[in-house]
Image (cartoon, helix red, strand yellow):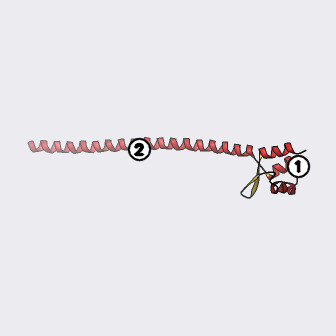
């Protein structure tokens, strides 16, 4: 009889250990899932901030720079005249991807100086 009780106690201990392992695994899984959800939220927030920053940067660049065609139309000059302005360093520019861009403030200053 004593041996039967010991066997039952041993079986119960094994069942409790199994349940304990299951609970630990479930807690670990829940913790990992919650941590993953937090990381996803952080990633989404960073993507949103990046989108906003990119939009603001693009707006800022559009407000600060004009391409060659815009300058030609605004100043009502030929491409050759624009070339000479660049050559004589009367109008600064940036070359980006093979395309010329001119600072809006410099173009406005040139407009004010011209008769």
Dividing the image into 4 quarters, which one contains the C terminus?
A: top right
Outermost residue toward the left? 1
Residue 83 located left or right of residue 7 = right
Residue 113 location, quadrant: top right
Pick the front one: 102 or 10: 102
The picture places residue 35, in percent across and down from the top left corner, at 44, 42
- Residue matched to label 2: 32
Q: Secondary structure at mark 1?
A: loop
Q: Number of callouts in the render?
A: 2
Percent from the top left, x then y, of residue 70? Answer: 81, 49
Name the residue: 50% across, 43% down: 40
Circle 1 packing at 10 Å, graded few (<14), some (14-19), many (20+), is few
Instruction: Write down the quadrant of residue 27 in the picture.
Output: top left
Residue carrying label 1: 76
Q: Quadrant of the N terminus?
A: top left
Of 114 and 35, which appears nearest the observer? 114
Q: Is residue 15 left or right of residue 113?
A: left
Query: Disc 2 and disc 1: Cα gap in Å?
Result: 65 Å
Residue positioned 85% across, 42% down in the render: 112
Ranked by sequence position, the earlier of labels 2 and 1 is: 2
The answer to whether 100 is drawn above or below residue 27 in the figure is below
Give percent across and percent down for residue 71. Answer: 82, 49
Task: Sort mark 2 into few (<14), some (14-19) or many (20+) by Cα contacts within 10 Å.
Answer: few
């Amino acid at each position: 009889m004593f041996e039967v009780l010991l066997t039952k106690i041993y079986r119960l201990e094994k069942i409790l250990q199994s349940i304990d392992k299951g609970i630990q695994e479930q807690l670990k899984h829940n913790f990992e899932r919650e941590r993953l959800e937090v990381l996803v939220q952080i990633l989404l927030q960073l993507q949103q901030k990046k989108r906003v920053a990119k939009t603001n940067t693009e707006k800022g660049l559009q407000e600060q720079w004009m391409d060659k065609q815009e300058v030609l139309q605004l100043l009502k000059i030929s491409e050759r005249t624009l070339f000479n302005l660049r050559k004589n360093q009367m109008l600064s520019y940036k070359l980006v991807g093979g395309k010329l861009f001119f600072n809006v403030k410099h173009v406005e200053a040139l407009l004010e100086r011209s008769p």
